Image (cartoon, rainbow, N blue to C red):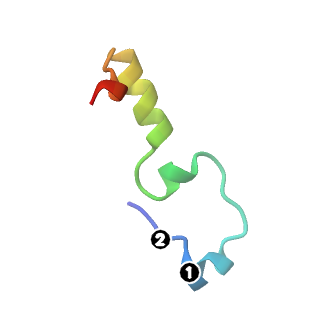
Amino acid sequence: GSFQIDGPGQMMIEHLEGDWTGVVGLPVFVLGELLKKAEYDVLSC
């Protein structure tokens, strides 16, 4: 699942460990690495 960590609720979060994008739902850096391994050229889209 994902979480919304902006607005007033962000004051309740003291520390995040790992990739912030993974915490909120889509691990963008992991996705990028997987696309690179699959030799998918993201920049040509």
- Where in the figure is residue 12, as x and y percent of width and height? 66, 78
Quarter residue 42 falls in: top left
> Which is nearer the eye, 4 or 40?
40
Residue visible at 36% across and 27% down? Answer: 43
Residue highlighted by disc 2: 4
Element type where label 2 sits in the image: loop
Quadrant in which the C terminus appears: top left
The three-letter amino acid code for the residue at tag 2 is Gln
The three-letter amino acid code for the residue at tag 1 is Gly
Q: Residue furthest bottom?
A: 8
How many labels, in total? 2
Quarter residue 15 falls in: bottom right
Q: Residue furthest front?
A: 44
Element type where label 1 sits in the image: helix
Residue visible at 47% across and 59% down? Answer: 24
Vertical relation: 16 (above or below) 45: below
Quadrant in which the N terminus appears: bottom left
- Where in the figure is residue 39, as x and y percent of width and height? 33, 14
Vertical relation: 23 (above or below) 33: below
> Which is nearer the eye, 44 or 10?
44
Report the mark closest to the observer, 1 or 2. 1
Q: Which mark is residue 7?
A: 1
Vertical relation: 7 (above or below) 32: below
Residue visible at 66% across and 57% down? Answer: 16
Tell me whether the residue at label 1 lies in contact with that at label 2, contact meaning CB atoms closer than 8 angstroms: yes
Q: Residue furthest right?
A: 14
- Where in the figure is residue 40, as x and y percent of width and height? 31, 20
Residue visible at 55% across and 74% down? Answer: 6
